[in-house]
Image (cartoon, coloured by chain):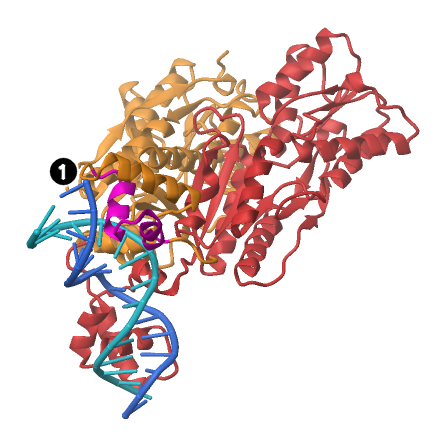
Chain colours: A orange, B red, C cyan, D blue
Amino acid sequence: MKGKATSLDIAHLAGVSQPTVSRALRGSPMVNEETRKRIQAIAAELNYKVDKNASNLRRQHSGTIALLFFEDPTPDDSQINPFFLSMLGSITRACALQGYDLLISFQQLSTNWQADYEDSNKADGLILLGYGDYLEAQQRLQKLVRQGTHFVRWGAVLPDQPGVSIGCDNRQGGADITRHLLEQGRRRIAFIGDASNHYPEFLERYRGYGQALQEAGMQIDPRLQVDAITTEQAGYDAVLHLLDQQITFDALFAASDLIAIGAMKALHERGLVVPQQVAVAGFDDIPMAGFISPGLSTVQQDTKLAGTMLVETLLRQINGEPVESRVLPARLVLRRSTGMA
Amino acid sequence: MKGKATSLDIAHLAGVSQPTVSRALRGSPMVNEETRKRIQAIAAELNYKVDKNASNLRRQHSGTIALLFFEDPTPDDSQINPFFLSMLGSITRACALQGYDLLISFQQLSTNWQADYEDSNKADGLILLGYGDYLEAQQRLQKLVRQGTHFVRWGAVLPDQPGVSIGCDNRQGGADITRHLLEQGRRRIAFIGDASNHYPEFLERYRGYGQALQEAGMQIDPRLQVDAITTEQAGYDAVLHLLDQQITFDALFAASDLIAIGAMKALHERGLVVPQQVAVAGFDDIPMAGFISPGLSTVQQDTKLAGTMLVETLLRQINGEPVESRVLPARLVLRRSTGMA
DNA sequence: CTGAAAGCGCTTACAG
DNA sequence: CTGAAAGCGCTTACAG
């Protein structure tokens, strides 16, 4: 910018040395109150702001967290899974509360995101967010750990994982919603979502589903599980697949709300009424879940708590405190798509 | 971090001076190709990354743009207007394309956002995003201009505005959708949204509405305009207000989709059928607009183009090139809420 | 094509 | 309580 004021300028005007300006402005206790007042007044008048680059360089710290958002496959245009947008909001808020800046980066899983942020001192740590192919990501996580990079991941919390993760209790959520469908008298419950270790969160939801069925003394019919990534299109396609294969079902648990919404569209097009003929449940509780018709029963993840936990855990890690993975509870939100209200 | 490699380390290992490392790594043409190769190999092995703080400090530039997102009133929790999330996505993408980082900050209109970013050299320029009270914001914009801060605003493009703005053609959009409602045979069209100069974008949409009515030889009934900010709640309340005042209407143009969605909820609760009894139109084309039932007719703003324009305009400004405000076209997206398809 | 020198604007021991 | 000095890790004239 045009001749921005520096601490030296302030020092001249205040008749003190430059370090004194630095001390005064950062509230060091070892500076005379009067001197401080004078310095502050001048700084305010000149609209002086500490140069972050200089300050960070000297302190070897950035006061910034980088949020790496990766989703796979590449979402078209600017359509981002609303669940992650909600997370984004809550992470931003949590950062602001802690006085940290948030650097944001939308990554394709394919680019080499691991390095550039913390390595170049732009950020003190990383938050990793996104449903992506976990096996692909895993080696990168290992590299991060090897490099001593500070990072926290949002996702499934599993024993063999590199680094620290925060995630919701996907298994419990999956079990709860499946029990609910069973209580509604449903017996042929389809699961729409990838159930491999490529997508551990989905896999956990699927395991919860299986657990609930077994508790009810029911068999798991593998034909009722159809792979789908988190898009409406995938949900839509999956339902058509079930119908075309003549696989009967009276309920459907989608591994995400986006999938559920696409599934409902397909059911509607084929003339099947929700919930009378097919009950539908999702996962996430994105805002749209409450607005579509009928309202979508789903498993809510507490994004506000999640954002706070992610940021706090990361900051603790940055400060050298011990941290560990955490599982947050999931909560049912029941609406008309499963016959409620 | 733990003993991160510096350019000096590389220099020692490569048997050259530190400046040569710097040159080699930034692709300066005045360095021997073999030397460069050697240096690059060592840098790669040590996972060396240029320290951005040092580099930026020296170059007096940050390679970062700050996105200041302000919304008023404070949205509850992490619920952000989906339209802005879409903008956010497209801005992020545009930044990435240009090799810039994006620093993001959710501001309440009340905090003093104007300064901290560019003034502290964290960002080379600012993008301002959000529906907020414009009159409140205006003096801050003026201050930004006075300070020579580089910034671009998303919003109404008006003659008397400080700084550069990019916005969609709100008036044209408002006129087009109103004409559409008139063509559908509607005669009592309510406008839900603040129509004061506190919210110039809404005001322009209202003017477009008025223009279309007048072209059709109709009077503007001021009782058909009800103030509302961009929330579902405001739209909901506005419709109840109209109904309770016994003001009749057969169509409703909401200044935003969020308002329209809240309005539809109120209509539904009062037993009014959309579009048979009341046609409803919104503005923005947020993803939800296509999912609610009936689908919401609306005016689409091209967020992809908008994000690109914002970033490009800002970068041009940063590079000292002349820039000016731009108006982007708005486009109708017609769905069942106004009786289409 | 390469090196020695200076300096970006801070913060932090070290003296006093 | 305050100042003189050093240094964070780069980039960029300036010499050669």
How many numbered marks are there? 1
Which x, y percent locates residue B75? 49, 26
Q: Quadrant of residue B219?
A: top right
Which residue is under mark 1?
Answer: A322
What residue is drawn where x is 72% and y is 10%? B243
Q: Is residue B226 left or right of residue B152?
A: right
Foreground residue among B139 and B13? B139
Which x, y percent locates residue B96? 46, 56
What residue is drawn where x is 48% and y is 41%? B114
Residue A163 seen in this snapshot: yes
Q: Is residue B323 left or right of residue B336?
A: left
What residue is drawn where x is 48% and y is 29%? B79
Foreground residue among B258 and B277? B258
The answer to whether B226 is drawn above or below residue B200 in the figure is: above
Foreground residue among A291 and B82? B82
Q: Is residue B166 left or right of residue A151?
A: right
**Chain identifier of the residue bearing label 1 in the image:** A
Specify the amino acid type for callout 1.
Pro
What residue is drawn where x is 49% and y is 23%? A296
Q: Is residue D8 left or right of residue A79?
A: left
Q: Is residue A13 magenta?
A: yes
Which x, y percent locates residue B247? 78, 11
Which x, y percent locates residue B287? 58, 36
Looking at this view, name the residue that lies furthest to the right: B217
Foreground residue among B294 and B333? B333
* Dominant SS type (magenta): helix
Q: Which residues are magenta?
A: A6-28
Q: Is residue B296 magenta?
A: no
